[in-house]
């Protein structure tokens, strides 16, 4: 059983009554926090930070010390699975991730091992266990992974991309090979997320950062189908508590109904989606997470407050006329920018807590 | 009157019967063509090319000599209006556009002149007139401009951007100042497009490349409202022929109904939109343009053909059961990549022409 001091996140994820809207922030442990930058400097590098359970635990907890957030999320990276597959992951300062041995042909794909991630990524499981211990039941811990398609794009392109020419070249030129790569990634991702649950993760999120660059048909075939396969094989329960799953496709607004139908408990939304309309469409089937434009956090705190209220009002009071509840978890529509002033995050969290209480009394 | 040898584009734009689906390609005159690169080398620079009517005419006509396209589009750049406003436009090799004196504060915005674009951008009007003469009625000529919001982002950021922090900082921090900037740009854009019509443009397109990065509310208030204002003031007719307008917001799929309601004749769609669903939603009000993923053109010609057919089939036969016609103009969902093999474009145009004839006989 969960014996959480603050179980608002899990209640909202399960569409149960909750006294105010829970809030956490994608990439909440990150470069916009001076204490994160200090730990990163001690770790020597991004990978030094992410592969060391003590450092990973330390930065995971930092935002919770500053802000009354309703969840912690494991500090890690969506490219840990390629790392475990041995393709050579590096992070260049200011350049983002690099894959030293990109995977572009059927031969390269078929030679790729499906790693024993519980073994190869033991440090992640150790970090999860350590964070759970340090959290001591204050708030739940979210584990995560990238979607097979999103992770595949980095492996194919060799790093970040703007137009993903090589990934789409493979998708249109040799779809069978791409399917085999995605199948391997889906197996590894399933194992990886289930191992996180075994180590203590209380909810799981799948980040499909690049699903939105696909056509509707290609999205369903090459991204959503594999997310569905992963979600369908996740452990649903641990120690008698349900482990909910959140799926977030950036740019996935047009495909909301399809995404809501794959068996996940929650759909994450970016800021281009009208939250009220999304609730009307799928709010009786899944909880919704989102969706403030992260760039709002560059505006003065008073504007941050207004815009946070606008997001909450767009969802509306979670209690329905028939007495049942819809679920809303407040978040940004994408990861927080490294240039965000931390005091604007304070204003945001405070506004969400205050206004969402008011909304429930209205 | 138009006396065009090939008026398929104008007929499809007007949702009139047409024997096959017309096709043109965003950025069809561009770097993927060796003859373009040769002219650009002679011109010395991108701006040397774009500001010289003879060079601009030459590259505008190049793709028509290679492919049986159904339209020409003026070769120019969406940043000609900022250029006319005197903010210092430069193009760095491989870096994209730079604005030397970005406009970020209310004071800077209020000091900006609304230029006499017919005068300041005389070279564009001369290019339009020259292209019309050289086209000699083969196919229609499309004129264009950027949307006020899209052009504003370049003026505020100082160039291209990924997350548009300064533009959104202004949007959320001083929306009144941003409205004044957009108002000035809308006036200049209206004058600019009407001057293109006066010089011979037979259809007009507004490129809203960055509308899709906004929240639904911000999109309506800061991008769509100004596009509507421009569209509402465009010359609708010249020499007895209707001058249709096309509006394209990249990432605008979720707001299709709103976009279809501003008075434009055609809505351009990117490849994330299901064309058949878009037709069901708004096909009785506007024609639709799009929407093949430009990256399909990296696949082998046979795959290009299949994917082009899939787009045409998604729209379906344009003739409705009641005998009226819906309009489809085949295009990519975004500008063609500079790395595209030109022979794949041949395969595309041929497939569109062949299959769309078949579709009409089915």
Image (tube, coloured by chain):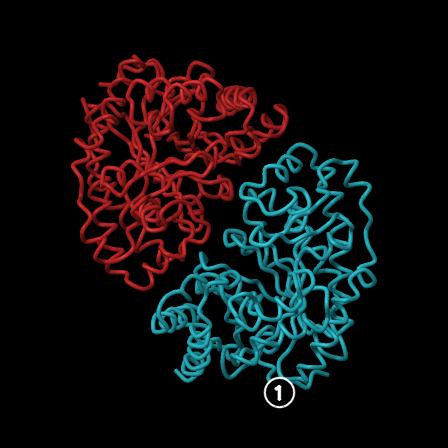
Chain colours: A red, B cyan
Name the residue carrying label 1: B5
**Residue at x 72%, y 60% (from the top left corner):** B232
Residue A221 location in percent, x, y? 30, 56
Number of numbered markers: 1
Q: Is residue B352 left or right of residue B114?
A: left
Residue A6 location in percent, x, y? 36, 16
Q: Is residue B292 above or below residue A102?
A: below
Q: Where on the picture, by quarter, is residue B75? A: bottom right
Of residues A190 and A115, the one drawn nearer to the viewer in this rendering: A115
Q: How many other residues sit within 10 Å of disc 1, few (<14), some (14-19) or many (≥20)?
A: few
Q: Is residue B31 above or below residue B160?
A: below
**Residue at x 36%, y 50% (from the top left corner):** A157
Residue A160 location in percent, x, y? 41, 45
Query: Circle 1 marks a residue in which chain?
Result: B
Of residues B169 and A238, the one drawn nearer to the viewer in this rendering: B169
Residue B244 location in percent, x, y? 66, 70
Q: Where on the picture, by quarter, is residue A20? A: top left
Q: Is residue B305 left or right of residue A85?
A: right
Tag 1 secondary structure? loop
Q: Is residue B341 left or right of residue A54?
A: right
Of residues A200 and B301, the one drawn nearer to the viewer in this rendering: B301
For the N terminus of chain A, the image quarter is top left
**Residue at x 19%, y 33% (from the top left corner):** A120
């Amino acid at each position: 059983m969960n014996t959480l001091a603050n179980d608002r996140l899990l209640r909202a994820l399960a569409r149960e009554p909750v006294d105010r809207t829970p809030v956490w922030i994608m990439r909440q442990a990150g470069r916009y926090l001076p204490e994160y930058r200090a730990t990163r400097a001690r770790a020597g590098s991004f990978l030094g930070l992410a592969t060391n359970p003590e450092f990973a635990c330390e930065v995971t907890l930092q935002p919770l010390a500053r802000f009354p957030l309703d969840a912690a999320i494991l500090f890690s990276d969506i490219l840990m699975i390629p790392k475990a597959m041995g393709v050579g992951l590096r992070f260049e300062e200011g350049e983002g991730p690099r894959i030293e041995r990109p995977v572009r042909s059927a031969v390269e794909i078929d030679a790729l091992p499906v790693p024993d991630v519980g073994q190869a990524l033991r440090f992640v499981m150790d970090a999860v266990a350590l964070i759970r211990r340090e959290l001591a039941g204050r708030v739940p811990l979210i584990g995560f992974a990238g979607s097979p398609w999103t992770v595949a794009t980095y492996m194919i392109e060799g790093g970040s991309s703007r137009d993903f020419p090589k990934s789409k070249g493979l998708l249109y030129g040799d779809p069978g090979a791409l399917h085999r790569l995605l199948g391997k990634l889906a197996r590894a991702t399933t194992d990886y997320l289930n191992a996180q649950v075994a180590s203590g993760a209380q909810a799981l999120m799948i980040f499909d950062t690049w699903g939105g660059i696909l056509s509707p048909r290609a999205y369903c075939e090459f991204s959503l189908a594999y997310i569905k396969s992963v979600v369908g094989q996740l452990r649903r329960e641990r120690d008698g508590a349900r482990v909910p799953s959140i799926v977030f496709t950036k740019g996935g607004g047009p495909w909301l109904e399809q995404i809501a139908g794959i068996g996940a408990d929650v759909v994450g939304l970016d800021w281009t989606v009208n939250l009220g309309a999304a609730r009307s469409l799928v709010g009786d089937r899944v909880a919704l997470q989102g969706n403030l434009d992260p760039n709002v956090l560059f505006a003065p705190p008073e504007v941050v407050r207004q815009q946070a209220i606008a997001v909450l009002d767009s969802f509306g009071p979670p209690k329905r006329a028939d007495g049942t509840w819809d679920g809303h978890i407040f978040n940004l529509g994408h990861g927080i920018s490294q240039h965000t002033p931390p005091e604007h995050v304070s204003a945001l969290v405070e506004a969400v807590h205050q206004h969402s209480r008011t909304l429930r009394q209205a």
